[in-house]
Image: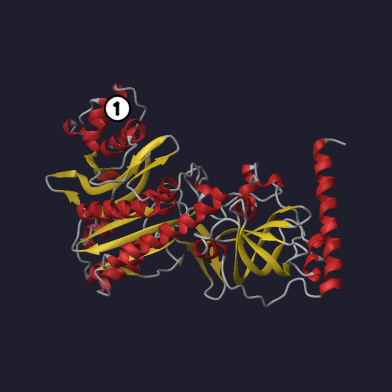
Amino acid sequence: MNDKTQETALSSDVTEVRAQKLKMLREQIGDVYPAHFHRTITNGELAEKYESLEPDTETQDVVTVAGRVYSSRNSGMFMDIRDASGKIQIFSHKDTTPEEARALLPMIDLGDIIGVTGVVRRTKRGELTINAQQITMLTKSLLPMPEKWHGLSDIELRYRKRHLDIMTNEESKLRFQQRSKIVSGIRRFMEDDGFMEVETPMLQSVYGGATAEPFKTHHNTLKLDMFLRIAPELYLKRTLVSGLTDKVFEINRNFRNEGVSTRHNPEFTMMECYWAYADYEDMMDLVERLFTELAISIHGSTEFTFVDKEISFKGPFRRVPMPDAVKEETGIDFLSLKTDEEARAAAKAAGFEVEKDATWGECLAFIFEEKVEPTLIQPAHVTHFPKDISPFAKEVPGEPRLVERFETYCNTWELGNAFSELNDPEEQRARMVEQLEQAHARGEKAKQLDDEFLDAIDQGMPPAGGLGIGVDRLIMLLTNAPSIRDIILFPARRSKAD
């Protein structure tokens, strides 16, 4: 029998033993999964309340706790149980624990969930402990825990069986607790800054607000093909038009039917906001204030480590126009190049292979991605993007080839994207029509013009700054997670059969 077959057989045997114990427990105590059980204190609260309790000291305090059994020693005389807040040791001895409760000990396996009522004490070795007076079986676990409590070594299994990963890996558990703290921190920051949170449709008959391949579905009642949204932008702008609020934001899921990588997941979280009578520079200030606050809330400082890099979220961040950044790295002065042909020739002379019909702005953006992005380790706002690739931003005064747009980079990743938003309805329509023609030329036949959005813009949208932040990548940085799948609770995966 090889190792794998032996492991499978052992697992099967263990599962059968647990099933037999469940049967015996049903006969012995009746309900093994009771609906009603009330603890009086969590393990974390217990540790805090009795932090100053001296070793070898017993109180008169009787408490009721509950949790999953993580270790068992001396035939169950000592057990460690964990709830979401921490660990507590359980001591069951004939001098303190009734025989009826001790009779349950042989039936308790690692992974079972139990409730314990007893007296609080601290052992001579300093371990906070409960002398069990009553033990209640709350949930019998029919499957064994991962071996040796070191978590799941198989990375794919960690993602597929996230409940086991969190159950046995304190780093994963902490990471998802921090994720929750970061998301709630973003929401609190935005609300404190005067932004109003709204919810816009995730099912849309016309998808837009970004360039991406959508997920398609069908509404049976309306007899209408629909799409999972790729961005909430056009609905949030309509909210600005309405006058409901001058500062609007949304934290929610976007869906893009594209590749999966360590930085990309087809379902991801964005925070998108729009601020009337503001511009892209106001949005830079907002990003810096938000990032600073989040870093302090997680690390107690604006300085933290990501893998092998020391990152600082202390503002102000570096601000550099894209043409200047490219010139610094390559010596190519794009602002001195007047035509698309000159831009392509300069790129080729410097050793870059660009498309034969690439425009001036596309050449600039390509070289930026190739040469500048890999250098952007500390937070930086890259400003003044080419108009060619930024159809919904206002032009930079005096330089119509560039627009008032920035992207925030850190660790070479794009974390945020912001514009001084275009609100000229005629220009907006012309650019959207052009974008639609380009999409159809790429084969995106489902792409349509969003006439309802254009109608709203005709009504008049105030000048505004707009911003989108990739929440997942920001969480990766702040929680030292090298893969996006480490911070998504249940990431998209192939089926087990594949």
Kindly state the secondary structure of the residue where label 1 is placed: helix
**Residue 229 occupies quadrant:** bottom left
Q: Viewed as shown, does residue 26 lie left or right of 477?
A: right
**Residue 217 occupies quadrant:** bottom right
Q: Quadrant of the N terminus?
A: top right
> Where residue 115 sits in the image (x, y, percent)?
68, 68
> Residue sitting at 28 percent across and 35 percent down?
364
Q: Nearer the viewer, residue 147 or 64?
A: 64
> Where residue 421 sits in the image (x, y, percent)?
24, 57
- Crowd tier of the residue under label 1, counting other residues whose Cα lies within 10 Å: few below 14, some 14–19, many 20 or above: many
> Residue sitting at 61 percent across and 62 percent down?
121
Q: Is residue 426 above or below residue 396?
A: below
Q: Residue furthest bottom?
A: 36
Residue at numbered disc 1: 347
Q: Is residue 194 visible?
A: yes
Q: Is residue 107 above or below residue 150?
A: below
Q: Viewed as shown, does residue 172 lie left or right of 208?
A: right
> Residue sitting at 38 percent across and 39 percent down?
411
